[in-house]
Image: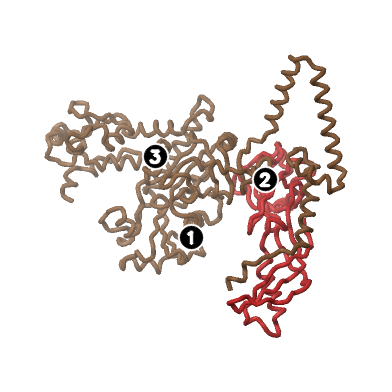
Amino acid sequence: MFFHIVLERNMQLHPRHFGRNLRDNIVSKLMKDVEGTCSGRHGFVVAITGIENIGKGLIRDGTGFVTFPVKYQCVVFRPFKGEILEAVVTMVNKMGFFAEAGPVQIFVSNHLIPDDMEFQSGDMPNYTTSDGSVKIQKDSEVRLKIIGTRVDATEIFCIGTIKDDFLGVINDPAAA
Amino acid sequence: MSLVTDSPVDSSSSDDFASFLDAALESNSSGSSPEGEAEEEEEEEAEEADDDKVEDNRVKRSKVEILEEVVEEACGSTLQGSLEQKLEESAKKDACTHPGSFGDMCILCGQRLEVESGVTFGYIHKGLRLHNDEIVRLRSTDMKNLLRHKKLYLVLDLDHTLLNSTQLVHLTSEEEYLKTQAAPFQDVSEGSLFMLEAMHMMTKLRPFVRSFLREAHNLFELYIYTMGDRPYALAMAKLLDPRREYFGDRIISRDDGTVKHQKGLDVVLGQESAVLILDDTENAWTKHKDNLILMERYHFFRSSCHQFGFNCRSFSELKSDESEAEGALATVLQVLKQVHSMFFDEPGNDPIDRDVRQVLKTLRKEVLNGCKIVFSRVFPTKFQADNHPLWKIADQLGASCSTELDPSVTHVVSTDAGTEKSRWAVKEKKFLVNPKWIEATNYMWQKKPEENFSVDQVKNQ
């Protein structure tokens, strides 16, 4: 799920960045530092959309660095248990398949793939129904339900299932 | 500048917001999901959040409790016992066995697992672990699938089996010419000599390897298992299989093994009774010797010969190479085809009950069938003769070994033409060969012409 929220961060800046462009420097540094990182609380920071305010700088004793408290608006992405997500399949093997939704890595075990879908090995391993009408292979798009999440410093892992109503392949690149 | 990164402080306002979201979503999801693991949270939040569902749940639960009481009161003691049993059974069914984990979460129920257990399958995907029961289950379903396609598993070693690599710094001055012949790593579909600048390596593919893989691919599901590290394994896989049609993600490096300095089939998702292994190092496979087909080592570079203590000139220095048509890979492909056809074409019981190790043993037994071998000056005196590797090899190849001469003896294996037994062999017109004959026969899986292994020839060398 995406959220647009306000976060705060203390930015430390080297004195060489001070001057006319101080504000720009803070913002570009903030983007570099924050975008693409994960936190267990908010999930994956997708993009910074605006700066609310930049507080008064505080000189750190002993160094020339100055700390600025910055409040910024950003879009975050965090998967939740029970959420329905659309993801792209990255790898299919006999254990199940792996899919990605942006930075989120999702594993769907073959226990959680409908029983009528069977694994087919070969150059392009896939799960196929017995009549061949539905096929999950690399680059297929699937709709799945998250049943477990774990957020690391840089990665988000999820366990998903497609063994439920209205879940499964939504777009098959092979058929197109 | 390192100071800069260490102060991510979240403001209290966003904290509140996030915790509110967390609470709201968590209670929603647990309300809709059947398992009651989040019940404690619900109770805490029930006071604050005026969520109808939570209230609903509470009411339902209390109803259930009342019902249970009623049932208990109404039922006799015997009935109650069976009821309890039933409840227990259903509880067992509901409890997840946690067949494996991905990023420390159960792959079946999504629960966080505290203890790390099971076998890591890092070569398939980072953070994936499977339990033994699950591995057994996967193997047996996969086995049925594979047998339907008339395939077996084949685990291939890289170095000295399919190819030979050397560090660029180890190239001798005589080998410098190779640098101009090597194909760049970008175009790997042609040629057999490659320079991997990024890894400071030069790699020579064994002659016949491309045809070997193409044919073996139709009969086997191929695995790579190397003692090299992961980047090396992937680079070599790219050389051998530029279109990624043979190996897929079945590339195992030393980083993925479970025991140090050992290779094991525990990370291979194939039933051991259907796995063949091609490797040049017998000691790496102590637990799976019966699955192993030993390969003659392929040395192309000088440094590789040197490493194994051979002082002869290498192929690279002689500007020659192993024979394409009669080399080790061509020979072993014949053996593999034979094993495959014996496994599948033999009439009788279901293929699922057959064992490839048994087939391999039978096939080996036929190589020297009918030979009777006597050794002379091969074993040190006082050495238990039937413990010697050569004796064991001859035995596995189907020859009968003996310490005494008698008319039924067909071969005398000797290091010296002057011994009593050697002279007897010449007099009686029996084959007199040197021990290399047995080794060559072992590698080639066929009786080599005895003339090429005469004992005098060895003395002259």
| Residue B146 seen anywhere in this rendered image of the structure | no
- Amino acid bearing label 3: Thr
Q: Are marks 2 and 3 in contact (CB under 8 Å)?
A: no
Q: Are marks 3 and 1 on the same chain?
A: yes
At horizontal 77% and vertical 43% (from top left) the residue drawn is B30
Q: Position of residue B202 (x, y in %)?
A: 41, 62
Q: Position of residue A165 (x, y in %)?
A: 79, 41
- Amino acid bearing label 2: Val
Check disc 1 and report the residue beneath it: B190
Report the mark closest to the observer, 3 or 1: 3
B70 or B373, which is in the foreground?
Answer: B70
SS at mark 1 in the image = loop
Q: Is residue B210 above or below residue A33?
A: above
At horizontal 77% and vertical 38% (from top left) the residue drawn is B34
Q: Is residue B105 above or below residue B376?
A: below
Q: Position of residue A41 (x, y in %)?
A: 71, 56
